[in-house]
Image (cartoon, rainbow, N blue to C red):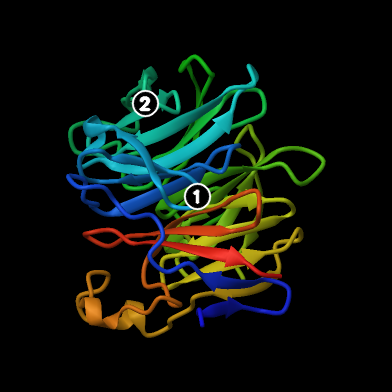
């Protein structure tokens, strides 16, 4: 019998062994994971073939993205106003925002914003995540650099920046992930203010609106599914919040994992199919099945099949 996790309203069976890699491809750190309208699953990792694509059953389809080797990090799939789905990346090694087709054809590259007041030889720009607003504007989180959020037009032209190091409203401490909340009356930006252990919510113009600081433990990024948010808490669990950002449940929680010496790269004997250790990315397909990518040197992907 398979392993089951979750609660009464969100129960899942672990699909052990899902997504086997073909000969010649080996995962690095599996940082991001996305799903398209046909429920194909895209895994982004730090080795060559940095984007690996599977169908819903876990059969390998194709791969691309050698240029992201070593810098693979932020990963976002968006249906633009032309009705076509595209992939958006942030590359920490090359300090780039990149937009591609689903097959990897590069359409746009945007480098460091022209802000010498924020960036110089000592103050690096290291973008960690990206999202796209309904009007096509692109938002990049400088999560490992100077802790700003930068806004660009769909063509890559610079608009504005906000944030910077701090813990007060509007300031950020490792804005690791960013996404667009479309569940309310107006779009909002959700920022995973990771080292402040909270989510910070902004208008699309960068005005602080509120904090979400309950039931989080080092939040990495976001995936909106219906009225719910699925987010990887790097400290060893997936958290699901409802339409009011209140806790529904934690999935795969292991409160001992991140406290182990050597974490996240623990002995293989430690891992359990129904527990996560260092979840960094998550997505949900049209069936409600959940896919998890973990920050581990040789990668780890888990599929959870929705039961209730």
Secondary structure beneath disc 2?
loop
Place residue 258 in its image quadrant: bottom left
Q: Nearer the viewer, mark 2 or mark 1?
A: 2
Q: Nearer the viewer, residue 23 or 103?
A: 23
From the image, which quarter does the C terminus lie in? bottom right
Using the image as rendered, state which of residue 172 and residue 130 is in the foreground.
130
Q: In the image, what residue occupies the spot 28% across and 82% down? A: 270
What residue is at 57 percent from the left and 24 percent from the top?
Answer: 137
For residue 300, say whether it is visible: yes
Q: Is residue 109 left or right of residue 239?
A: left
Asked whether, in this view, residue 165 is left or right of residue 136, the answer is left
Residue drawn 79% across the image and 45% down it: 184
Describe residue 66's horizontal placement relative to residue 251 as left or right. left
Q: Which mark is residue 99?
A: none
Q: Is 71 or 285 nearer to us in this picture?
A: 285
Q: Residue furthest right?
A: 185
Above or below, 273 relative to 93 = below
- Name above or below for residue 112 compared with residue 59: above
Q: Which residue is mark 2?
A: 104
Mark before the other along the chain sequence, 2 or 1? 2
Residue 27, given in percent of the width and then of the height, sits at: 24, 52
Q: Nearer the viewer, residue 149 or 24?
A: 24
Circle 1 residue: 171
Residue 167 seen in render: no
Marks 2/1: CA–CA distance: 35 Å
Image coordinates of residue 172 in percent, x first then y, are: 47, 51
Residue 88 locus on image (x, y percent): 45, 31
Could you say which quadrant of the image residue 147 lies in? top left
């Amino acid at each position: 019998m398979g392993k089951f996790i979750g609660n009464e309203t969100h129960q899942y069976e672990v699909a052990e062994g899902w997504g086997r890699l073909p000969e010649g491809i080996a995962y690095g750190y599996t940082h991001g994971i996305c799903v398209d309208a046909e429920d194909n699953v895209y895994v982004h990792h730090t080795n060559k073939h940095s984007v690996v694509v599977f169908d819903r059953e876990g059969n390998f389809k194709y791969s691309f993205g050698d240029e992201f080797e070593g810098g693979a990090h932020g990963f976002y799939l968006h249906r633009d106003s032309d009705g076509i789905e595209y992939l958006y990346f942030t590359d920490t090694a090359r300090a780039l925002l990149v937009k591609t087709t689903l097959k990897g054809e590069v359409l746009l590259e945007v480098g460091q914003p022209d802000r010498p007041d924020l960036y110089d030889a000592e103050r690096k720009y290291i973008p960690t995540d990206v999202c796209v607003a309904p009007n096509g504007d692109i938002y990049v989180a400088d999560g490992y650099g100077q802790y700003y959020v930068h806004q660009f037009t769909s063509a890559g032209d610079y608009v504005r920046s906000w944030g910077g190091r701090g813990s007060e409203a509007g300031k950020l401490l490792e804005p690791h992930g960013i996404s667009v909340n479309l569940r309310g009356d107006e779009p909002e930006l959700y920022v995973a203010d990771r080292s402040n252990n909270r989510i910070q919510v902004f208008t699309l113009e960068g005005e602080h609106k509120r904090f979400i600081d309950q039931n989080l433990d080092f939040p990495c990024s976001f995936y909106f599914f219906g009225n719910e948010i699925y987010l990887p808490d790097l400290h060893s669990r997936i958290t699901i919040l409802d339409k009011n950002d209140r806790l529904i449940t934690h999935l795969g929680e292991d409160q001992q994992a991140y406290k182990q010496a050597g974490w996240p790269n623990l002995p293989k004997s430690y891992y359990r199919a129904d527990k996560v250790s260092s979840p960094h990315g998550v997505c949900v397909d049209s069936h409600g099945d959940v896919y998890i990518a973990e920050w581990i040197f040789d990668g780890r992907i888990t599929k959870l099949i929705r039961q209730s």
